[in-house]
Amino acid sequence: MKRLKGISFPTENGRYANAEIENLPLPERVVLPLVTRFGKMIPIVSPGDHVQAGQIIAKGPQKWFPPLLASVSGRASAVSSWPTGFGDEGPALVIESPEGDTPPPRDDVAQKDLPELMRWIQAGDIREVDPSPLPLALRLRKPDLVPSAFASFSPALEKPIHSLIINGIDRQPGIWLRKAMIGLYKNELLESIPVLKDTTGASRVFFAVAKGTDLADDLLQGLRERGVEPVFCPNIYPIGLEPLLIPFLTGQELPPNSEGGREFGTVVVDVTTALKVRGAARGEIPSLDVVVQITAPSSGIDTLVRVREGTLIEDILEALSLSREGLAKVLCGGPFLGTALHRLDVPVTQEIDSIILQTEQEIIHYSNEPCMNCGYCVLHCPMKLLPNELTKHCEYGKFDVAERMDIFSCIECGICAYVCPVNRPMVQLICFGKREIEAARKES
Ligand code: SF4
Ligand code: SF4
């Protein structure tokens, strides 16, 4: 196993151990963005149509695109522009007067028929918090399950899968959703393992958790009986992210611009996604709900809620009776990896696992001070980059130099900003540089 760079953080002690998930009431509308990580969806319902929960409401331009499903029943409105949890804005479909019905499981989805199961996972619109260049329903397929219509999408799909990592490590310090889900749904997690093993064909399966995570004896026994190796990984952020976790467990480095672990025979699935795959294997539609951690330090709130996908952050606040007074910033996606939002009419989608509400006193303000060459960012960068130099090149428009220095290997983990004593806006500068390089590539 490899030695890791990053930052050490203490074991989360007990906050997740007795966690419960509060089911919040339906809001007056849900907002479903039509732009996903894989591209723009085309709506197939018209304004005024009544849609059913689980009905396909938008399709992608390619066959391999997962469809977009209605998370509630209700009346579809016209497509309009909405802010997203990633700081941008885009077209979204609004469903008004929602009803919270849940379609009954389809009993004709037979677990034994793998091609049918893969079709159901594909149709289930499972989207992940961890970004991956390959959608889940493609990534999970061993080569003989990849239909010829999909094979041309990526040469990575022709590679056999030797390792499967079920990832129970939370993405960043302060987030404990995955640990809680392991405790709450241990039997369901065990049921997901044969499904994931069958679809991937992986001969080696890891169950990765952070050191100190309390795993029940029957879970550990169940994992071993299913041929799964539990691995307690060091509490070093960002070990829970695929570019660090795969090399740590398998020794395989992921080169820049690769298509992730699938290209090298490893598939990583986080525990919440594993639970959704298990749901799909039982004929359920696993994508209607989102479980999200809501943290408001000034109100002493740190809790898990379950909402229908597309519920607005402002409706969650109202349901939890959280005051907006003094609220200065919303971090959507966690303290290190999240996006700072300054509005609350933002829909919560499956790609979001946490929302942090900050007052003015809790915000870290970045400065325009020059780098003092202390080297802390270089010391801690998990991708072994030179964040000090990269950000200076982005700041002064030397994007070609930043590109040669592997700017695209940056996983935007935020460690360089966290350790920087002058609070330089490291990730913002790197993201700016990446955007400029991508725009220049498109123009040429
Ligand atoms: S944000 Fe990028 S440059 Fe900064 S520490 Fe993380 S990987 Fe390194
Ligand atoms: S941590 Fe900040 S001040 Fe220190 S070298 Fe990096 S960018 Fe410069």
Image (cartoon, rainbow, N blue to C red):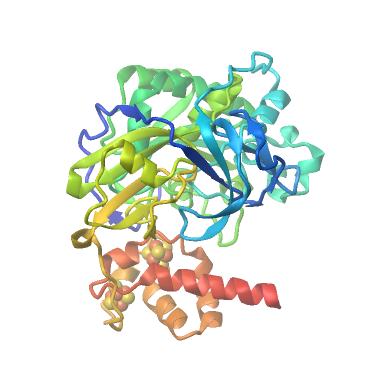
* Residue drawn at x 31%, y 19% as measured from the top left: 217
Residue 119 is situated, as x and y percent measured from the top left of the image, at 70, 30
Query: For the view shown, which residue lies furthest in the right direction?
Result: 148
As drawn, is 280 to the left or to the right of 294? right
Q: Is residue 406 visible?
A: no
Residue 171 lies, with reference to residue 308, above or below; the image says below
Left-right relation of 358 to 353:
left
Residue found at the very far front of the displayed protein: 48
Q: Which image quadrant: the C terminus?
A: bottom right
Q: In the image, ligand 1 is in what quadrant? A: bottom left
Residue 70 lies, in percent from the top left, at: 59, 35
Quadrant of the rendered image containing residue 441: bottom right
Q: Position of residue 105 (x, y in %)?
A: 59, 17
Query: How far across and down, in percent of the image, does residue 54 sit?
Result: 61, 29
User: Nearest the camera: 349 or 241?
Assistant: 349
Which residue is pictured at 63% across the width and 32% down the height?
51
| 378 versus 114 height, above or below | below
Q: Decide which of 392, 235 is in the foreground and name it.
A: 392
Image mark count: 0
Quadrant of residue 14 in the image? top left
For the point 25% across and 62% down, which residue is it?
363
Q: Which residue is pictured at 59% across the width and 25% down the height? A: 280
Is residue 219 among the parts visible in the rendering? yes
Along the line of sight, which residue is nearer the eye, 245 or 108?
Answer: 108
Please state if 436 lies on the left or on the right of 223 as rendered.
right
